[in-house]
Amino acid sequence: ELELRPQGKLQITVAKANDLKNMEMIGKSDPYVVLYIRPLFKIKTKVVDNNLNPVWDETFELIVEDKETQTVIFE
């Protein structure tokens, strides 16, 4: 059986975004960031209400199981 074992941790800080496109008809967007290496273990920042230049300044640790093939996805 093939089993992936942790090779390490990846620390990522989601700092901010600038000049986001407004996706709302009324008011401004409520942006957040979703990040993951494996879709089953998604992490989400806080939601910044009514803001097109959000500041999160949040740090996360992701477990890396195969540093040669895995990538971080930001949504």
Image (cartoon, helix red, strand yellow):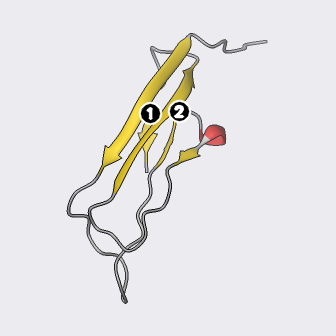
| Residue 71 visible, this orientation | no
Furthest residue toward left: 19
Q: Identify residue for label 1.
A: 72
How many residues crowd mark 2 within 10 Å: few (<14), some (14–19), many (20+)?
A: some
Local crowd size for mark 1, using a 10 Å CA cut-off: few (<14), some (14–19), many (≥20): few
At a point 20% along the width and 63% down the height, the residue shown is 19
Which residue appears at 67% of the width and 15% of the height? Answer: 4
Q: For numbered disc 1, what is the local secondary structure? A: loop
Q: Secondary structure at mark 2?
A: loop
Which percent across, then down, holds residue 35? 48, 42
- In the picture, measured across the screen, residue 21 lies left or right of residue 46, that is left
Q: Which residue is mark 2?
A: 37
Question: Which quadrant, please, contains the N terminus?
Answer: top right
Instruction: Relative to 13, say whether 7 is above or below.
Output: above
Do callouts 2 and 1 mark residues in contact (Cβ within 8 Å)?
yes
For the point 26% across and 64% down, which residue is it? 20
Lower sequence index among marks 2 and 1:
2
